[in-house]
Image (cartoon, rainbow, N blue to C red):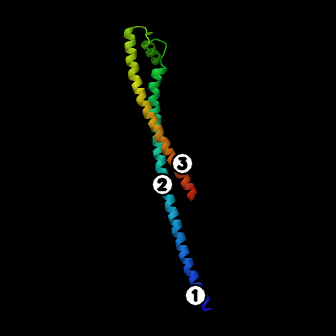
Amino acid sequence: MKYGLLLLVAAGMFALAADRGLSQDTSAEETGCEEILSEKQDLKEQYTAQKHNEKKAFSNWDKYYKELHSIEYGGTERPLAETAKACREGDGPDKPFCKEALKRYDELAEKEGQAKKELDATKENAGQLGASMRALSQKAQEKGCK
């Protein structure tokens, strides 16, 4: 009987210690989930803003690209890029026309190149943010976060 009472007291103490440890683990998991979900929400907001910037960058690049490659230039019935190429090859209408066409082409080509770099950078940033969001989603799923 004496040992039974000691065994019962020891079992009770062990149960209290185990319960306290489990509740701390649960609390730590909840805190971990809150942090993960908060970080995921922040990344989602950044990603949304970056996708908006990407659309603006695409629109800017597309404007220059179309002006160079889609729109007829100066009544030649061909885009500025083709007109400039013809002028460089000596097949242009006349020297003053070609001088102006090449000047315009160079201006637009520089702007188009800068716009393309900006578009590529925004795409890359959005891709990195998306990858980070997917990694956090996977981590949240593994932890059982809701």
Badge 1: residue crowd in 10 Å (few <14, some 14–19, many ≥20): few
* Residue 118 in picture, x, y percent from top left: 42, 34
- Of mark 3 and mark 1, the one earlier in the sequence is 1
**Circle on res. 134:** 3
- What quarter of the picture does the N terminus occupy? bottom right
Q: Which residue is mark 2?
A: 38
Q: Is residue 49 visible?
A: yes
In the image, is residue 129 above or below residue 111? below
Name the residue: 43% across, 27% down.
Answer: 112
Distance (Cα) linking label 1 and label 2: 48 Å
Q: Tell which of 75 and 81 is nearer to you.
A: 81
The local secondary structure at tag 3 comes to helix
* Residue 137 in picture, x, y percent from top left: 54, 51
Q: What's the amino acid at mark 1?
A: Leu
Q: What's the amino acid at mark 2?
A: Ser
Name the residue: 43% across, 8% down.
Answer: 93
Q: Is residue 56 visible?
A: no
* Residue 84 in picture, x, y percent from top left: 43, 16
